[in-house]
Structure formats: structure tokens, C-alpha cells
Image (cartoon, rainbow, N blue to C red):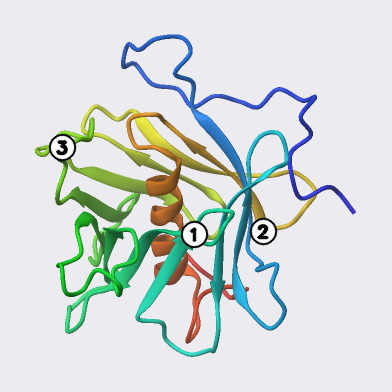
Amino acid sequence: MAKVHPNSGMPEPAATTSTSRAEEEQPTVLTVWRKSLLFNCDGFTVFDAKGNLAFRVDSYGSGRRAEVVLMDVAGKALLTIRRKKLSLAEHWVIYDGDAAAAAKAKAKPLLSVRRRVSLRASKALAHVTPLQVQGSSISSTEAYVVEGSYGRRACAVRDARGDAVAEVRRKESVGDDVFRLVADPRLGAPLAMGLVIALDEMFGGGAHSLLRRTWSA
């Protein structure tokens, strides 16, 4: 069976963008495995370009999820991806850190992710809007659109100029449960992975999305 994590000796492709930046600010290339390393858990295991563990998601139980937490290697909550209640379309909000623990202090929302719902044909899957940008390079007036097919592992998060700030790409010979995620420095790897989690919940199909294999957009 092919390796899940990248071969550090193989160069990884870089995401294309017209934005000028220092040469050392290269896109981050991750390998995403739609499987938790914990027994009896659904989730994600994410490796960096050297094959080291970068992020993880471990979700217990089954059924429709209200929120998913992205953690670092040590289990610290980096982001909380929470479903908005009573929304007409799929609507998820990405919060900084552990939103449940920060409830009394009011959790800090970072991005809003709305599934596109329309009878008209379009390449757009979802729309992403920054909610709070203090201390970030993300413009408060800049919104993003997700285009392509998450189910086919071929989609990109694009800014108003059409530049990709995150891309999901197929990884050869390992199936749909393992794929590449390329994150531009303007968005960052944690937020890019948070968007992947939201897309998986929206387009994974079935009653709950993690590790689902049914049709998706």
C-alpha cells in the first residue's frame, strides 16, 4: 500500500498566486488522512511535508455533528468548527481555539462558511467570509469562494482576484481518504484545514460526514 504521509525526498507542488511575497513564504503542503489514530473515533490525521504529525481531529459518537475541533499534535484545540443553528442552508462558523471553553468569555469567530444553494449551475461550492481579522493579514473586506469538487478532491478557495489561498488535490494511488492540502501563507495551514473540515461536513454525504464514502459535490 502506498504511504499515507509524503515522501520527504519528493518535491511538493506549490499553489500558484500572483501576490508578491518573500521567497521564503512558500505554501504549506499537508497530507490529510480521513481517519483518526484513536480507536473507535472518526476524524482526520494530518501530516506535514516531512511526514510528521501536524494536526488531528478525533470525534466520538455518530450522527449529525454540531461542532468539530481541530487540534495540534499535543491535543490543544486550535479551531472549533461549529454548525449554525436554524440556517436555511449549511452554515458553519470557524472559531479560534476551544469555543466551548471560551463560551463565557465569548468565543472569537474567524470565518463564516456557507454552502451555496441555487438551481443555477455554478462552479462555486461555498462562500467564505472573514468575521474578525485583528492581528491577521486577511482583509476584512475580502471574501472567498470555494470552487471545484470536494468529492473528487479537486477544489480551491479563491480570493476576489481568483488566486488560490487553499487547494485540495488528489494524492495518487491512495484513494479518496488521503489527499493533499496546499495552504497559502495569507490564509495559513490551520484555517485551511478548518475549511476542509467544514467542506467535509457539507459535502461528505449521509447523516454524518467524517469517513463517509457516498457521493458528494
Q: Amino acid at mark 2?
A: Asp
Q: Which residue is mark 3?
A: 142
Q: Give the quadrant of residue 90.
A: bottom left
Q: CA distance from mark 2 to mark 1?
A: 22 Å
Nearest to the eye among marks 1 and 3: give it: 1
Nearest to the eye among marks 2 and 3: give it: 3
Q: Which residue is mark 2?
A: 176
Check whether the beta carbons of the residues at disc 2 and disc 1 lie within 8 A of each other.
no
Q: Amino acid at mark 3?
A: Glu
Residue 113 against residue 184 in the figure, above or below:
below
Q: Which mark is residue 71?
A: 1
**Residue at (66, 27) in percent of width and height:** 12
> Is 88 left or right of 123, judged from the image as shown?
left
Q: Which mark is residue 33?
A: none
> Is 141 left or right of 15, judged from the image as shown?
left
Percent from the top left, x then y, of residue 64?
42, 86
> Is 212 left or right of 120, judged from the image as shown?
right
Percent from the top left, x then y, of residue 186?
33, 30
For numbered disc 1, what is the local secondary structure?
Answer: strand
Any part of residue 115 in sight: no
Q: Residues within 10 Å of mark 2 (few under 14, many from 20)?
A: some
Which quarter of the rendering shows the N terminus? bottom right
Check whether the beta carbons of the residues at disc 1 and disc 3 lie within 8 A of each other.
no
In-front residue for pair 36/171 = 36
**Residue at (37, 75) in percent of width and height:** 67
Percent from the top left, x then y, of residue 157?
36, 42
**Residue at (21, 74) in percent of width and height:** 103
- Mark 1 or mark 3: which comes first in sequence? 1
Nearest to the eye among marks 2 and 1: give it: 1
Q: How many dots with numbers?
A: 3
